[in-house]
Image (cartoon, rainbow, N blue to C red):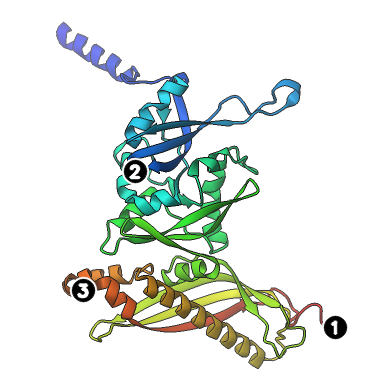
Amino acid sequence: MKCLQLILVLLLISITQTGCWNRVELTEKGFIMGVAIDQIKPGTIKFSVQLYKPGQMAGGQGGKQDNSFFNIETRSESIFDAVRDITLHLGRRAQFSHMRVIIINEKTAKREDLISLLEFFYRDHEPRLNTKVLISEGDASEFLKIKPLIEQTVTQQLNRMQEIGNVGTGKVPDVNLLELSQALKSQVPNIALPVASKKKDVVILAGMAMIKKGKMIGTLRGKQTENVLMLSDQYKSGVLQIPCEKTSKDAKNSTEAVEIQMVKTKLKPILKMDPLKVKVDVNIAGNIGELKCTKFEKREDQVKFQKKVQKLMEERLKDTIRFTQKEKIDLIGLGNQIYRSNPKLWKKWKKDWDNRYSTAKFEVKVKFDIRNTLSIVGKPLSDK
């Protein structure tokens, strides 16, 4: 009986005690905020990391604020080995659980399969799969040296730019490690990644990189980026600029703006036709942002404006589809949709999908609805 009581007491004590057999103190870690990858030559990787510098947000001597980050560069034949070499510079173990972005040089992205290049980040338990991935114009390591405008580090700034830019402008794809692997392991291994560029020590996201079968093949700019996001049903919100008609008063170089609040796209492939025919239905709804040459004095004026926007968007979307067909890259998810709906047919089409996509006939139909003019005045405010 006493023996049983002793066992119960020991059991209760063991349950109430806390501890970690493999704990690592904070002072033994260096927290990685971002990574830049540049292939110097085949077989050699320059691996640059940005680390958070704790305790440096307060002013230094004379109230001068020190940087809250610093960068370390290692070189090796593999990323795994380059990661271990960070300790030789830092004297601490690299911790990747707070990593925000991975920047890959465009030349490297054109040479290397991205899944193979990033394998360390998928195998290791620390990196989070919601880490953003983007392509850089020029050396990726140079972007880590840019002074952030408002965030504590440029890597955090790039994370927010991709996230908010996708939701608020419709000009930036928002892609993380998980989405990248899912796309490149799908039946049609294509995806678009955001492209970062530098202008006078300021970083901007301009356009997207086309990734085909794991490697970068080119870029999309301006309206093409918005159009691909619309066609792939990834467009959240943004602004459409509508040029004034030349016959309108003061129409020269004038554009009107529509705030897009909703875009819903449906692809309807007609599988029995050869060449393949695809119906694309795009529903757009938004508010009037700026008027320069249009007046909504009658119901007919609104209908005319809606038809104008519909025609303009149909032509823009068709132009972008033709561009992707010329490049033989399905960025709109058509092949994966056919695979899900008819896997038996897809088995026959998969090998020749690039050619079949490039010769497909697309019928684009846009429906545009004005939700609000955001004013009781249905004409340009400059009009008397």
273 sits left or right of 223 in the view: left
For marks 1 and 3, give the one nearer the viewer.
Answer: 3
Report how far apart the C-alphas of labels 1 and 3 lie in the structure. 61 Å
Q: Vertically, is 146 above or below 163?
A: above
**Residue furthest top as drawn:** 2
Q: Is residue 45 visible?
A: yes
- In x, y percent, where is residue 142? 54, 41
Q: Residue at x 25, y 86 (%)?
A: 274
> In the rendering, which numbered label is found on residue 349?
3
Helix, strand or loop at label 2? It is loop
Q: Vertically, is 113 above or below 263?
A: above
Q: Residues within 10 Å of mark 2 (few under 14, many from 20)?
A: few
Residue marked by disc 1? 384
In this orientation, which residue lies closer to the viewer: 331 or 41?
Answer: 41
Q: Earlier in the sequence, mark 1 or mark 2?
A: 2
- In x, y percent, where is residue 178? 35, 50
Residue marked by disc 2? 42
120 sits left or right of 158 in the view: left
Q: Is residue 338 visible?
A: no
Q: Residues within 10 Å of mark 3 (few under 14, many from 20)?
A: some
Q: Earlier in the sequence, mark 2 or mark 3?
A: 2
Q: Residue at x 50, y 40 (%)?
A: 141
- In x, y percent, where is residue 351? 20, 69
Q: Residue at x 50, y 70 (%)?
A: 224
Q: Quadrant of residue 361?
A: bottom left
Q: Amino acid at mark 1?
A: Lys
> In the rendering, which numbered label is found on residue 335?
none
Helix, strand or loop at label 1? It is loop
